[in-house]
Amino acid sequence: KNEVEQSPQNLTAQEGEFITINCSYSVGISALHWLQQHPGGGIVSLFMLSSGKKKHGRLIATINIQEKHSSLHITASHPRDSAVYICAVRGGLEGAQKLVFGQGTRLTINP
Amino acid sequence: DSGVTQTPKHLITATGQRVTLRCSPRSGDLSVYWYQQSLDQGLQFLIQYYNGEERAKGNILERFSAQQFPDLHSELNLSSLELGDSALYFCASSVRGTILGNTGELFFGEGSRLTVL
């Protein structure tokens, strides 16, 4: 079993829909990152969370430390949100410095 | 623009060769991290440097080495290249890099795409 599991692996939705991507991890962590990777390959860090909830524009990230679960929500989705979203945890079995990555969720938003 | 610069963006070379990937972190960031993204393995942490010193090591092969220079730029050296080394290599930087606690936001470069033929 991977240390970080994301679901779904692939998600296709219509423009305007509310999107939820889930991330579960199996060990205690010090922080969780949500990353966005566009088709060109570049990676952008969206959020870093250690507790609670963060919001940036149409993006919301939450984390439940007790349940070892995080969600990334996108409100009023747009085709430009189409990308791979990657959850990564820090401070698990690999230690504080090493990010362990989920396999990614490929999101496609159709106009 | 993350402020992290990676060169070259694309590199094609042959098996057995050696290449050097370069990373300039954001101004003021002391930590540099290297990651490899291949089709079959996904993203994997390779190595971290903090203010010139190696701080953490991940799944980095012995054929690979890295260093961080006094001006804080970093180089990842890949030698005796194999077909399986073809991947995207990302560099990221952050302000902090302490072993205890979190290391702050990460800022990624655009990546260097290595193709080994």
Image: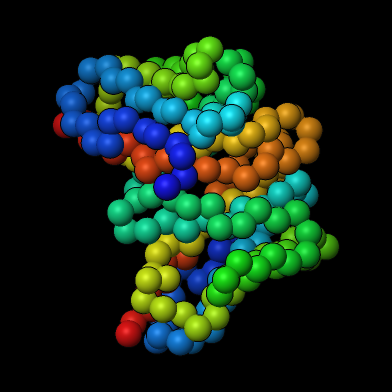
Residue situated furthest right in the rendering = A66
Q: Position of residue A108 (x, y in %)?
A: 37, 74
Question: Colour mode?
Answer: rainbow
Residue A83 lies, with reference to residue B107, above or below; the image says: below
Q: Position of residue B68 (x, y in %)?
A: 51, 17
Give the quarter of the figure containing the N terminus of chain A: bottom right
Residue at 32% over, 58% down: A39
Residue situated furthest front in the rendering = B27
Residue at 45% over, 37% down: B4
Q: Position of residue B5 (x, y in %)?
A: 40, 34
Residue B104 lies, with reference to residue B29, above or below; the image says: below
Quadrant hosting residue B12: top left
Q: Position of residue A82 (x, y in %)?
A: 38, 70
Side of B112 where A13 appears, left or right? right
Q: Is residue A86 visible?
A: yes
Which one is in front, B25 or A91? B25
Which one is in front, B115 or A46? A46
Side of A31 where A8 appears, left or right? left
Side of B112 where A75 appears, left or right? right
Give the quarter of the figure containing the C terminus of chain A: bottom left
